[in-house]
Amino acid sequence: MIIVTDLSKHFGNTMAVDGVNLEVRKGGLFGLLGPNGSGKTTMIRMLTGQIRPTAGEISVHGIDVLANPLTVKELTGIVPEQETPPSFLTAEEYLYFVAKIRKLENLEEQCEWWFSYLDFAGQKDVLCKDLSRGTRQKLMLAQAFLHDPELVIIDEPLINLDPLMQRKVKDFLQDYVKRGGTVFISTHILEIAREICTDIGIIYKGKLVFSGRMDDSAIGSRPLEEFFLELVN
Ligand SMILES: Nc1ncnc2c1ncn2[C@@H]1O[C@H](COP(=O)(O)OP(=O)(O)OP(=O)(O)O)[C@@H](O)[C@H]1O
């Protein structure tokens, strides 16, 4: 579903991503893990066509992201890091707006389902600028999944969500991949990865230092934290 070849991104002298090769299989729940500043967000911004790499190639759905970023965007749900919905629209207006862009036929039904599932129907008429951070995150998650894309890429999916909502979103993500979707998340919370990911990649100082299945023999039965610390220390 995603193939990354010799991918690098430099910001001045900072090698944010440095020669990464990675494959994310269709139907997997892939977690990109790494300490703060290791290059996770930069990777996601390149995968979603938000920034151009310094070098390398990215294929998503078999399409070259650099040559056809808009086609890839149509086929992918995206939740960028800490991005918020437009301040001047209500939650409902924003979701309908996205539903129209995504050309959904039963948009009312779809939007209502999300308001109800993520338990924020009571905030439908509130301007996005006045929503709590958690509710804005719910709205961002809803807009990404609204058109039932084959691939969803989420930077820190559970940020700002309370434990009950975290549980719901984790269940949803696991169910989504069981139904054939592919999910790519970034997180620095190892327990999330251990609990829900089928595959992980670990990035450290811009380099991919591990990628494999969660049941990879290199990880074995030891705590993920132990394996992670071994690689990033
Ligand atoms: N626009 C930019 N200009 C300059 N440097 C940048 C820019 N974006 C990222 N960097 C640098 O690139 C490196 C990787 O940053 P990135 O945000 O990708 O890390 P991250 O793994 O997502 O971190 P965190 O977990 O803290 O969000 C950092 O050193 C960061 O300071």
Image (spheres, rainbow, N blue to C red):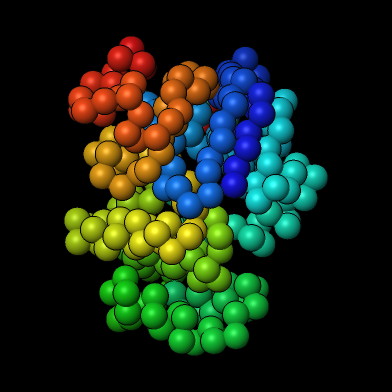
Residue 105, percent from left and from top: 60, 85
Residue 10, percent from left and from top: 64, 22
Residue appearing at x 68%, y 54% in the figure: 72
Above or below residue 189? Residue 87 is below
Between residues 206 and 230, which one lies in front from this camera angle?
A: 230
Above or below residue 176? Residue 233 is above
Residue appearing at x 44%, y 42% in the figure: 30
Residue 149 quadrant: bottom right
Residue 76, percent from left and from top: 59, 57
Between residues 47 and 172, which one lies in front from this camera angle?
A: 172
Between residues 74 and 125, which one lies in front from this camera angle?
A: 74
Residue 209, percent from left and from top: 46, 19
Between residues 100 and 146, which one lies in front from this camera angle?
A: 146
Residue appearing at x 45%, y 28% in the figure: 211
Residue appearing at x 54%, y 79% in the figure: 96
Q: Residue furthest front?
A: 217
Q: Is residue 72 visible?
A: yes
Above or below residue 167? Residue 194 is above
Residue 210 quadrant: top left
Question: In the rendered view, does 192 fall on the left or right side of 186?
Answer: left
